Image (cartoon, rainbow, N blue to C red):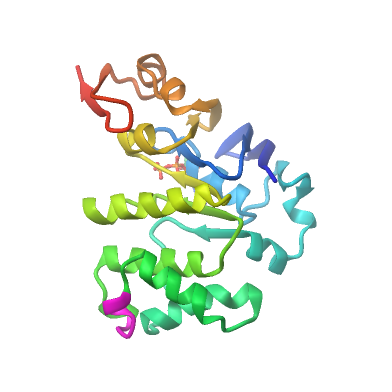
Amino acid sequence: MNLSAKNITVTGRIADVSATLEPGKITAICGPNGAGKSTLLSCLGGLITPDNGYAELGGVPLSDMAPIERAKQIGFLPQNGEAAWDVAVRNLVALGRMPHRDAAREPVDAAITALDLEALQDRPISQLSGGEKARALLARVLAGQPEWILADEPLAALDLAHQLALIGHLRKQADAGTGVVIVLHDLALAMNHADRVVVLDKGSFAGQGAAEKMLSHAVISEVWKLDIDWLGESGSKALSIR
Ligand SMILES: Nc1ncnc2c1ncn2[C@@H]1O[C@H](COP(=O)(O)OP(=O)(O)OP(=O)(O)O)[C@@H](O)[C@H]1O
């Protein structure tokens, strides 16, 4: 089931943005500061109701889905997310099961393992570093086993090893059929790890396609106003500013 934005306008933030995201792929939403990435992601997650247009999942507008059904299908990780209560890591991750109204242990254990949180699982959230907290919040999303994972800058607070581990984990999820949509500022991470890239520029849709096409010299020059070269091999490219 595709997740689509249909001519979405949120006044003052994004205008007439359409994009179609496919399950089983990692899609990166890229663009300069203020381009509208978080706004689009929030519309796709059903957190913002657009002023015009709509988001739909499998042809059904999100606004027509019961909130609990939407929460089962779409796991959302906001930018700089916070935990509402100062609970232990394991309990926070277990909250990811809320849409299912169960206390299944296996998905919670799997999420804790995937995010390398075993040693921290009894520690209160207030006693974690920023990166550890970011991993715990993402583990809560994974524990819900959603069909779609929408994450706003999930790598920003992570060290390189945990960035790569997390990307590897998201790749496994995508390979298993989950739709993964991430807002990314790091264009090299997007180039090397995203199957598809949606580019936004000043609140407008600037294009959608394979990473190599959407992050070409020409597009980066046009949208980011940077003169760059891509160095290295496919899958491990680095960006060099001329
Ligand atoms: N709650 C809000 N109310 C009004 N305007 C907002 C609000 N949040 C963001 N904006 C504006 O909407 C535009 C898009 O913001 P958005 O946060 O979606 O961009 P972004 O691409 O995610 O930016 P960044 O890379 O800086 O996180 C910006 O001009 C921003 O100032």
Eyeballing the image, is 94 above or below 208? Answer: below
Residue 25, given in percent of the width and then of the height, sits at: 53, 41
Q: Quadrant of residue 134?
A: bottom left
* Residue 231 included in the magenta stretch of the image: no
Residue 41 in view here:
yes
Q: Among all residues in the image, which is located at the extreme top? A: 218
Q: Nearer the viewer, residue 231 or 54?
A: 231
* Image location of residue 112, percent across then percent down: 39, 72
Instruction: Decide if residue 15 is on the left or right side of residue 173.
Output: right
The image quarter containing residue 72 is bottom right
Residue drawn at (51%, 47%), measured in percent from left and top?
175
Give coordinates of residue 54: x percent, y percent.
Answer: 72, 43
Q: Relative to 227, does residue 112 appear above or below in the rendering?
A: below
**Residue drawn 68% across the image and 61% down it:** 70
Left or right placement of residue 28 versus residue 48 in this view: left
Q: Is residue 175 left or right of residue 1?
A: left
Q: Residue at x 57, y 84 (%)?
A: 103
Q: Residue at x 33, y 20 (%)?
A: 225
Magenta segment: 118-124
Q: Position of residue 76 (x, y in %)?
A: 53, 59
* In this view, 124 is above or below 17: below
User: Can residue 84 be seen here?
Assistant: no
Q: Quadrant of the C terminus?
A: top left
> How many marks do you count on the picture?
0
17 versus 180 height, above or below:
above
